[in-house]
Amino acid sequence: MKLFLTIFLTIFLAEIGDKTQLATLMFSAKNENRMLVFVAVATALVMATAISVIAGKFLETLIPLRYIRLAGGFLFIILGVLMLTGKF
């Protein structure tokens, strides 16, 4: 349960205010059928997440987990700096 909550909170907080959420807001505002918008967006997010999980499992067989974590941390830092400087 601790792992679930850690993953849930990390992804939930990371997704707040991102491009996907803003696009969902626009689709919802422009369309009467909000349930269709919800199902389409949820399906797209599930599919994108499934691809990430499969890719992560595949990378684990090729690259040691330590290097994957380092690369992920490095990318987050780079993206954060780019966002703070207005270049992303």
Image (cartoon, rainbow, N blue to C red):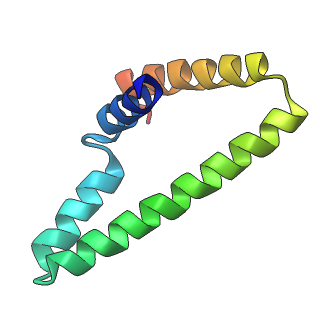
Q: Is residue 75 above or below residue 19?
A: above
Q: Residue at x 47, y 60 (%)?
A: 46
- Residue 78 x, y percent position in the rendering: 54, 22
Measuring 43% from the left and 33% from the top, which residue is drawn there? 4
- Report the side of 71 relative to 42 (left or right): right
Residue at image location 28% in from the left, 61% down from the top: 23
Front residue of 4 and 35: 4
The quadrant in which the N terminus is found is top left
Q: Position of residue 16 (x, y in %)?
A: 26, 40
Q: Is residue 76 above or below residue 39?
A: above
Quadrant containing the C terminus is top left
Q: Residue at x 37, y 35 (%)?
A: 8
Residue 54 horizontal/vertical position (percent):
70, 51
Vertical position of residue 38 compared to residue 64: above or below: below
Q: How many marks?
A: 0
Placement of 62 over or under 46, stated as above or below: above
Answer left or right for 71 relative to 88: right
In-front residue for pair 54/69: 54
Left or right relative to 56: residue 74: left
Q: Specify the quadrant of the image occupied by residue 42.
A: bottom left
Q: Residue furthest right?
A: 62
| Residue at the extreme bottom | 32
Residue 85 percent across, percent down from the top left = 39, 22
